[in-house]
Image (cartoon, grey):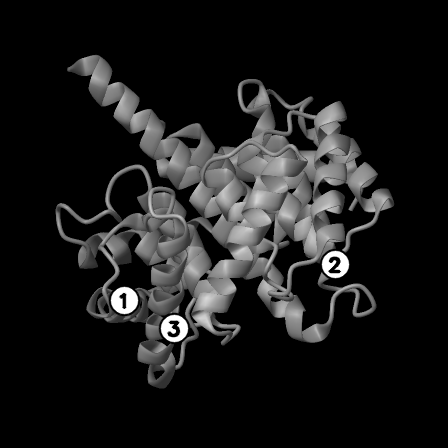
């Protein structure tokens, strides 16, 4: 798909989502939903999307984190299933209950973690237990940084079945090395350090240098910020070459010409990275078939975590101002 066609697809999908989600929904959330459909080459279906929102509303209590401006985002992710939205919604609630029983708090991030679980009910408890073990090990290494916004990564990475203590130690080693290389400390760097262990938990110093190299390339030409750190991690571990990084930069520049990104240029880069990463799933010589199925989940989770974080900060700021 030519870059101008991608921009047109983004604009068309954005307008459709915005009209259904409502004008009160945070723009970053709308852009995240748009990114999900465009990068996955999935056509936006207004009827199914509306049904998904209704299905979640019916099952979510008044104080559920599913309600509010994040509801449309979760509804979009619910439409990924080949089952009916009612079946998908029931399964999401069942997974959420298993995660709660395993010790995860009931937050928007626990629902994101639930989305990353397999659909076989026989594996729910095992997946939840592994994720909680890894999360607890991560918290030992970074007590103050590790919180519910790490749930999705704990679930995704827990699937590797590595020893949780060894895995968490590898994350901490990457965190320290990445900071020494030049990355700024904080939650985003923790996410990056987690992503760096996705292929192999053994520490590789050359990956640290490559991650910084990619970040510098993107920062020179785009609005690359710490919020993009995890995506840079994906580009690093999947060994994306400079030619593809340049393609990301060109697509970002094309998207930035759209008025939809006038005040959200960092999201243009996110969508560009997502689009190029999705292309890699069609190339067996670049990403193995076993990993290809996980790439969409990775991108979906990261976009969701990013939007949820931005929306939470915005809501907190509004509340403080009103107070």
- The percent position of residue 146, horizontal first and vertical second, equals 37, 48
Q: What residue did someone put label 3 on? A: 130
Residue 143 x, y percent position in the rendering: 34, 48
Q: Are marks 2 and 1 in contact (CB under 8 Å)?
A: no
In the displayed orientation, state which residue is furthest to the left.
Answer: 62
What distance separates the C-alpha of mark 2 from that of mark 1? 32 Å
Q: Is residue 52 visible?
A: no
Q: Label 3 neighbourhood size at 10 Å, few (<14), some (14-19), many (20+)?
A: many
Residue receiving disc 1: 99
Q: At x 26% / y 50%, what residue is drawn?
A: 107
Looking at the image, which residue sits at the far bottom? 122
Residue 95 found in image quarter:
bottom left
Q: Is residue 73 above or below residue 296?
A: above
First along the sequence among labels 3 and 1: 1
Could you say where residue 255 lies in the image, as x and y percent from the top left?
A: 68, 29
Residue receiving disc 2: 280
Q: Position of residue 7 (x, y in %)?
A: 68, 34
Q: Nearer the viewer, residue 158 or 247?
A: 158
Instruction: Select label 2 or label 1 by which is in front.
Output: 1
Picture quarter containing residue 9? top right
- Report the mark closest to the observer, 2 or 3: 3
Q: Earlier in the sequence, mark 2 or mark 3?
A: 3
Q: Decide if residue 196 is in sight here.
A: yes
Question: Which mark lies nearer to you, 3 or 1?
Answer: 3
In the image, 187 versus 277, the foreground residue is: 187
Secondary structure found at label 1: helix
Q: Residue at x 25, y 39 (%)?
A: 68
Q: Is residue 236 left or right of residue 137?
A: right
């Amino acid at each position: 798909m030519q870059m101008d066609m991608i921009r047109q697809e983004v604009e068309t999908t954005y307008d459709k989502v915005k009209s259904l989600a409502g004008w009160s929904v945070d723009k970053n959330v709308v852009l995240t939903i748009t990114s999900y459909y465009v990068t996955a080459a999935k056509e936006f279906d207004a009827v199914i999307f509306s049904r998904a929102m209704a299905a979640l509303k019916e099952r979510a209590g008044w104080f559920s984190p599913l309600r509010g401006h994040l509801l449309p985002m979760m509804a979009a992710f619910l439409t990924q299933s080949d089952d009916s939205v009612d079946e998908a919604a029931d399964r999401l609630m069942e997974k959420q209950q298993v995660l709660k029983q395993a010790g995860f708090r009931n937050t928007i991030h626990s629902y994101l973690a639930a989305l990353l679980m397999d659909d076989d009910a026989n594996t729910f408890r095992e997946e939840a237990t592994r994720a909680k073990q890894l999360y607890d090990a991560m918290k030992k290494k970074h007590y103050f940084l590790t919180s519910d916004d790490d749930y999705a990564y704990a679930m995704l990475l827990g699937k590797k079945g590595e020893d949780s203590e060894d895995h968490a130690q590898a994350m901490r080693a990457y965190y320290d090395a990445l900071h020494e290389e030049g990355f700024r400390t904080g939650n985003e760097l923790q996410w990056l350090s987690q992503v760096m262990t996705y292929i192999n938990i053994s520490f590789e110093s050359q990956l640290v240098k490559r991650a910084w190299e990619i970040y510098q390339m993107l920062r020179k030409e785009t609005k690359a910020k710490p919020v993009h750190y995890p995506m840079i991690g994906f580009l690093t571990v999947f060994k994306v070459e400079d030619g593809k990084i340049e393609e990301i930069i060109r697509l970002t520049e094309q998207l930035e010409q759209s008025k939809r990104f006038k005040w959200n240029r960092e999201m243009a880069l996110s969508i560009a990275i997502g689009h190029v990463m999705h292309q890699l799933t069609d190339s067996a010589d670049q990403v193995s078939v076993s990993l290809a199925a996980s790439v969409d989940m990775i991108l979906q989770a990261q976009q969701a975590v990013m939007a949820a974080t931005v929306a939470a900060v915005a809501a907190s700021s509004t509340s403080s101002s009103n107070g």
